[in-house]
Image: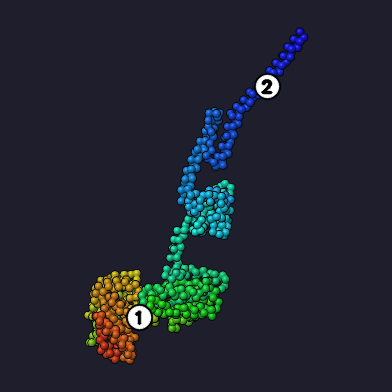
Amino acid sequence: MIISVLLTGIYNGIFLYINQALLISLFITVLSILLTHLYYRINKPLNDISKALSTLKQGDLTTRIANNNTQPLEYADITQGLNDFADNSEKTIQELQLIFDSAGLGITWVKDRHYLTVNAKLLSIFGYTREEFIGQSTRLIYCNDEDYKRVGQAYKKIAKGETFSTDVLMPKKDGSTFWCHLTGRSTGTGSSSVWLFEDISTRKKSEKELYTMANYDSLTTLANRDLFNIYLQETISKSYRSKRPFALIFVDLDRFKYVNDSFGHDAGDDILKTAATRMKNTLRESDFISRLSGDEFTIIIDEASSVLGLETVARNLLKELSRVIHYQDNEIYIGGSVGISCYPDDATNANDLLNFADSAMYAAKNLGRNTFAFYSEEIGKNTEKHLSLSQGLRKAFENNEFELYFQTKMKMETREVIGAEALIRWNKPGEGLIPPFEFIPVLEESGLMADVGEWVIFETCRSIKKWQEVGINLGVIAINLSERQFGTKSLINIVKNALSETGVKPEQLEFEITESLMMDDSERIISVLSQIQQLGIKIAIDDFGTGYSSLAYLKRFPIDILKIDRAFVKDITEDSDSAAIVDAIIAMAKQLKLTTVAEGIETEGQYALLAHRGCDIAQGFLLSKPVPFGEIVKQHKSL
């Protein structure tokens, strides 16, 4: 009994223990199941979402959250939203990358002066691959440390929200260089910035070509007048600040026009290039040489402190210019005339310095050419006289102070008046007649010759008409044409208007030109002269034999008359050479069926010899001095 009770108690105790253990195990199992369920329902989705957000933040837009049946429904919308966001962002980035790579400019994103990303255009500009560029220092694309540091200073400006731009010479991977227009601006996030690269090599080349065309002479490659004027003004400013003198040298080539006309324009161009090179080689690096115009050159000698030094420079220039120049099979000699003005002794402004050097150059020419002269007060007085004449001529034209005088011409065989030459005179109030040799060269240089020449044509026609009205017929009246009249205004229209206005016939006029006119732009001159000749007006070459006489020009140009220069006529009775030259001119004219006129006849001996040699027409003081219109009328009334 006791044993039975004891066994029953033990059994009950064991059963109770087992039940408790089972309950604990069951609790643990249930708890584990619950925690596992909670992990998969809450924690894992949250971890997946957190990881996805982290990778997206790092820029990996390929990240997606697996959306399967095991995922809790309450997170499905969040997962789908994140995946949709990643899809849209990746698509947008791809589109932006396509736009980025398709941009016409090179674009890069820089942080701490290292490349984070670049577009395709930038890679094509520099010739690198994306892998070779990303992560590299921006020093990679600079030719030198100086440019790298200079652009580096821009980051301070960029950090303030400003835009920086500059032009930089940059190297490509292959070692070649190009000009790049660089623009940088901040992204607004820390030390990062965006930079734009534009290859402007073609533009730079065009700008350089345009600059060269605008500032340098295409033939000699020396600076032209415009650049000279700029440099001269800058030199004056620099010398004013430093209190150091400098000199301006004006060089004019001697005999250039003769050589250019004798051997042709190609030879002339070769001479100009050779002269320019030789002069440049005598100068220092700090000196400046330019081609002012034609065969005129200017040189600025920096910090010229002694006359002796300038004389040495001038002599070296003349020595180089006097050396023989070989052109094809010819040996050509030119030489030069040099004028020098000094800052600040002679002048302190650009205009005076240039004018004074020019005046000194002409003084050197008057000394016999191939020499030099410094500007002086005496030269200045001559310059002032020249300026006074120039100003006076303008007033003379405005105030109708010019008059026409006429010198008759006679037929050699009969001494019959067959024409006259119209000669301009300046009757200056208070001074009387100014000698033509004084004012006509100034008239040419002043720019008034075209207008004055037009007045001469009209006034000559008006004089012919007035003579006709009183029954006077002098024959053909010759008018001297200046090269200036072949310029901007239409000479043909002027002649036609004068003839139409006065009713004078073209056959009553004759135009005289100089030999030098035939050397300048000959095709244009031939065209104008041919049109004049077609009107019925004859063409004469004045002062034939003293300038650039050439049978080729006589053949090409529409010429009717040769006027033998007075220099040969003057000595014809005493100098055999002069007589031989006159014989040759007359013989040549007859062969070419041209009329000959001897001007400057002053003695009966000259007249007789010329008549014997076969000259057609005579002109000179022996027959008649130039007289005004009224005197011609008086002479005919007295007949």
Mark 2 touches mark 1? (CB < 8 Å): no
Which quadrant holds residue 60?
top right
Residue closer to the observer: 430 or 364: 364
Residue closer to the observer: 426 or 241: 241
| Residue type indicated by callout 2 | Ile
Coloring basis for residues: rainbow
Q: x, y (%) of residue 257?
A: 38, 77
Residue closer to the observer: 454 or 507: 507
Residue closer to the observer: 37 or 80: 37
Mark with earlier residue (2, 1): 2
Dot 2: element: helix
Residue at 46% over, 81% down: 371
| Residue type indicated by callout 1 | Gly
Tell me the residue that label 1 is attached to: 547
Q: Which of the image's four quarters has the C terminus?
A: bottom left
- Residue placed furthest toward the right: 2
Crowdedness of circle 1 by 10 Å Cα count: few (<14), some, many (20+)? few
Tell me the residue that label 2 is attached to: 24
In the image, residue 423 above or below residue 34: below
